[in-house]
């Protein structure tokens, strides 16, 4: 049994550590009290009534709280979700108690322990393809520069179809502070039609090869396994697959054989159809569970767990309100234990929020504001068109996050 366990909110004791030090609390006492200072809420989905009742009683006995469906006590319902609330100490007690319980609750103990472990991580690592070293995420926001070698992308379509101009643009973004360049040869704007394999290869491979030879870290935005294969030969490091390995059954195998980092994104449908239905009963839960499933699938295909990055898919099959919900709830995705990439640069939801029917070229200020909030809420990577401006905004957001962490927040 595998449960979906995710953190849905955190109430941190602001400045707890520094304030205890300030008033002269013994260091040993601070260590003892830390587990009592920080409070967590988790949502656990699809529990049987028997499981839910045991969890509730055990957490209550530890001093925490558990909210479950009122039909659980009488077992009148087949399943229930639960909201578990408690301190770190209380959850540690719960985990130990569940290990000895029936009804498959030993697995629930492992799932909850894994969720706790992930949200307490200050840094996450992604293994590099070329040298086996690691990128570290969490110290500062990583900036991914967008380079679309397409005629029809919603913002920069047609600007960099010429390979030399594309390479110059990529180098310019590196100079402006990009950590890597994401090259796309097929538009994924709403309503976009697919292009042939031959056309995508013709657009992408020469630019990848030229930038890689200049020492630039390159990712390729593609859903085609053959494009990925040829891109790796040309020097690409990462594959950014908006279909999360669903569009091409060979993609996972190609990436696993290359030992490549991958970005797995949530999207409903295809770019051609994704905005036709943007209703969700519980958007954050559906996106979380989808990405959790795709991470598990990638691992089953031989992808190194430390090579996976996740993307909630801002603008891909979501309403403006849905995009805001995901940005607001990014901290919940930390439970998956993988770096979170967010691509919101100049997207139409920004105009919907501001109430100005502006063209993409006029959405920079909204992009920077949304990006800074995303960083505050848990984004590790921003995929952007405007590298210099995004780098500056992210630097401020990073500084504020560092200050908050120094003051005892988690």
Image (cartoon, rainbow, N blue to C red):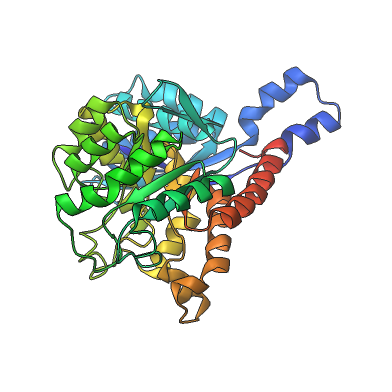
- Residue at figure coordinates x 29%, y 48% from the top left: 204
Instruction: Residue at the far front: name it.
Output: 164
Location of residue 238 by image quarter: top left
Instruction: Using the image as rendered, state which of residue 192 and residue 373 is in the foreground.
Output: 192
- Residue at figure coordinates x 58%, y 39% from the top left: 39
Residue 45 x %, y %: 32, 44
Residue 162 x %, y %: 34, 57
> Would you place residue 102 above or below residue 232 in this image?
above
Instruction: Using the image as rendered, state which of residue 366 and residue 119 is in the foreground.
Output: 366
Location of residue 127 by image quarter: top left
> Would you place residue 148 above or below residue 98 in this image?
below
- Residue 72 in view: no
- Direction from residue 363 to residue 187 in the image, left or right: left
- Residue 250 in view: yes
- Residue at figure coordinates x 52%, y 58% from the top left: 386
- Direction from residue 80 to residue 346 in the image, left or right: right
Point out the image quarter for the N terminus.
top left
> Would you place residue 61 above or below residue 188 in this image?
above
Residue 267 x %, y %: 27, 55
- Residue at figure coordinates x 32%, y 60% from the top left: 316
């Amino acid at each position: 049994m595998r449960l979906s366990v995710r953190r849905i909110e955190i109430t941190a004791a602001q400045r707890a550590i520094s304030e205890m030090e300030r008033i002269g609390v013994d260091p040993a006492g601070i260590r003892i009290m830390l587990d009592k200072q920080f409070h967590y809420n988790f949502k656990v989905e699809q529990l049987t009534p028997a499981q839910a009742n045991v969890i509730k009683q055990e957490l209550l006995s530890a001093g925490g709280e558990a909210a479950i469906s009122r039909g659980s006590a009488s077992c009148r319902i087949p399943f229930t979700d639960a909201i578990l609330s408690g301190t770190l100490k209380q959850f540690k007690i719960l985990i130990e108690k569940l290990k000895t319980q029936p009804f498959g609750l030993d697995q629930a103990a492992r799932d909850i322990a894994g969720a706790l472990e992930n949200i307490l991580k200050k840094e996450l690592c992604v293994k590099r393809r070329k040298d086996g070293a690691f990128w570290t995420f969490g110290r500062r926001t990583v900036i991914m520069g967008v380079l679309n070698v397409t005629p029809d992308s919603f913002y920069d379509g047609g600007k960099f179809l010429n390979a030399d101009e594309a390479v110059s643009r990529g180098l310019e973004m590196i100079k402006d502070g990009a950590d890597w360049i994401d090259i796309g040869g097929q538009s994924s704007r709403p309503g976009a039609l697919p292009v042939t394999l031959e056309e995508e290869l013709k657009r992408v491979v020469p630019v990848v090869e030229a930038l890689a030879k200049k020492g630039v870290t390159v990712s390729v935005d593609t859903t085609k396994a053959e494009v990925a294969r040829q891109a790796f030969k040309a020097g690409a490091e990462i594959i950014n697959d908006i279909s999360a390995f669903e569009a091409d059954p060979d993609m996972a195998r190609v990436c696993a054989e290359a030992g490549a980092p991958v970005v797995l994104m949530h999207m409903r449908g295809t770019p051609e159809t994704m905005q036709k239905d943007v209703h969700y009963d519980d958007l954050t839960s559906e996106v979380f569970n989808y990405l959790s499933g795709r991470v598990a699938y990638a691992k089953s295909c031989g992808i190194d767990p430390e090579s996976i990055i996740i993307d909630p898919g801002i603008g891909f099959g979501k309403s403006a309100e849905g995009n805001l919900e995901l940005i607001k709830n990014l901290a919940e995705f930390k439970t998956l234990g993988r770096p979170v990439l967010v691509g919101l640069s100049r997207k139409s939801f920004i105009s919907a929020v501001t109430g100005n029917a502006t063209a993409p070229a006029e959405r920079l200020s909204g992009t920077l504001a949304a990006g800074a909030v995303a960083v505050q809420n848990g984004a590790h990577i921003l995929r952007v068109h405007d590298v210099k401006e995004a780098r500056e905004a992210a630097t401020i957001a990073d500084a504020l996050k560092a200050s908050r962490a120094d003051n005892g927040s988690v």
